[in-house]
Image (spheres, coloured by chain):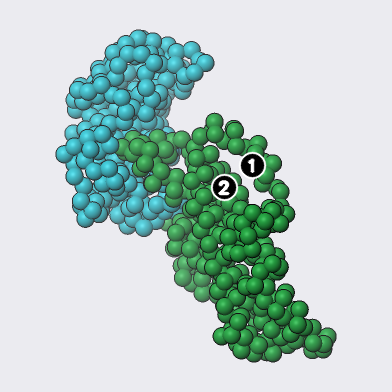
Chain colours: A cyan, B green
Amino acid sequence: MVRVRGLTFAYAGQPPLFDGFDWQVGRDEAWAVIGPSGCGKSTLLYLLAGLRQPGSGQVWVGGQELLRPRPETGLILQDYGLLPWATVAENAALGLRVRRFYGPDGRHAPREAKVEKAAIGQQVVWWLERLGIAHLRNKYPAQVSGGQRQRTAIARTLAMQPDLLLMDEPFSSLDALTREDLERLMLELRAETGVTTIVVTHNIEEAVYLGQRLMLLRQPPHREGLLIENPGGGQLDYRQHPEFQARCSDVRELLGEPTVTGGKGTRA
Amino acid sequence: MFASSSASQPSRGERERVRKRDALLAAFGILIFWQLLALLIDRPILPQPLEVLQAFVLALPEDLGRHLLVSAWRVLASIVVAVVAAVPAGLALGLSPRMDRLAAPVIYLLYPIPKIVFLPIVLLLLGIGNLSKIFIIALILFFQILVVVRDEAANIRPELVASVRSLGAGRRAIFRFVYLPACIPAVLTSLRVSIGTAIAVLFFAESFATTSGLGYYIIVETWGRLAYDQMYAGVMAMSLLGLALYMAVDRLQHRLAPWLAVS
């Protein structure tokens, strides 16, 4: 699904974040990328989304070299990225409206995805209901909670039926309960849609809960990440397993953080 | 737990009704004040409201109506010209820091200049017809709108643009779905603020070297003939024109930017 070869990237006037970086993500896999802030993990996601271009090296997504944002890739950001002047329903419809705006040109929208105006409404309602926010459809983002905003952003992205879902600290602005709620929801949605997911987070519990494979990024520049298999990740009740805590401690140690007991994940 | 907090607030319709009632009360209060002042001064230079209203109704089908229409058309045309020119220019400056760096010092110098002082030159260049008046008002509105649209476009968060780009939006769609709707409220606010100035400038520009418009009607046709009742009818017409435009922009803002009313 994703293949990164010899990736080099640096922001202007700064030391490189990636220097000959390699990575590979298979179809249907659930990845979590974890590391301290400033380690370049969000930049990596932007590179995979086609919103930034590598200095050298290549990013391949879905069998093609990535030169611009790819219509089949969905992106979910920490600050939701909702239009403040559009209602929940209008925001959820935005991706489909953009597709309709261009037509199926293969560049801004998949070639086979012809979007009918009437179909937009139906699909949006379906997704709003699935995410439990249909009753808020006429509210503006400023009128709903952070969790509901992120649900709106998720509905907007999934309505476009992406085959790759990229999430950048998706739940970091939310309180612990809402966060765990949405983490569970993401696991359900992943099971329903089979979408390949890559979530970037600085939260160890979140990474271990969501990712079946983990990649640790420490101090840049990165040549490769430290890969950890986490076969229990992605199970709804994984938090209750003793293995979950052990895995979190492992990761914490590998990241060089002091081991603290009783992370907030244990009392879920 | 996440129940929306707006349920306890009055709905928008309710709020508007309250505002309407307040506005009517205020209008009534102003009329009473005027009536008292007229009785107190008791001279032809301040007629009573009813006399003026009578003169207004009588003059409207005659020449006053024509002058009102001419003035209204000049302001509306100026607004359209200013919006059509300033919105794209403001967006361009807001989106291109390089262009803004070039233009900012020029705008900084030109913005505070009272454009009305160019009226003699504009009259010389564009003649004494509609064109010169529309140009001078549009020039004033242009700078107001240009500055707010530029700032609005420059302040759009890059994360918002990135997330819309990730939905497949290219330049055109970003423009259509992000920048354009983002600047609508700013345009309307700047219009609302500058309508008073626009009409003041119109009044001045119409008060000489012309034969039509409310400014001409007030200064030349009525004041010049000491026809105070009609002069006040002209003042009333000009006030109503300003009020109507102000309310129209207000309504437009409610319709085009409903999210501002709820947050």
Amino acid type, mark 1: Ile
Where on the picture, by quarter, is residue A241?
Answer: top left
- Would you place residue B28 above or below residue A98 in this image? below
Total tally of numbered discs in the picture: 2
- Would you place residue B80 above or below residue B44 in this image? above
Q: Is residue B244 visible?
A: yes
Q: Are marks 2 and 1 in contact (CB under 8 Å)?
A: yes
- The quarter of the picture where the N terminus of chain A appears is top left
Give the camera-side residue of A187 and B212: B212
Give the camera-side residue of A119 and A260: A119
Q: Which mark is residue A175?
A: none
Identify the residue at image location x=72%, y=54%. Answer: B117
Which residue is tagged 2? B146
Which residue is tagged 1? B107
Secondary structure at numbered mark 1 = helix
Identify the residue at image location x=37%, y=18%. Answer: A54
**Gap between marks 2 and 1, in whole Å?**
9 Å
Q: Is residue A246 left or right of residue B54?
A: left
- The quarter of the picture where the C terminus of chain A appears is top left
Amino acid type, mark 2: Leu
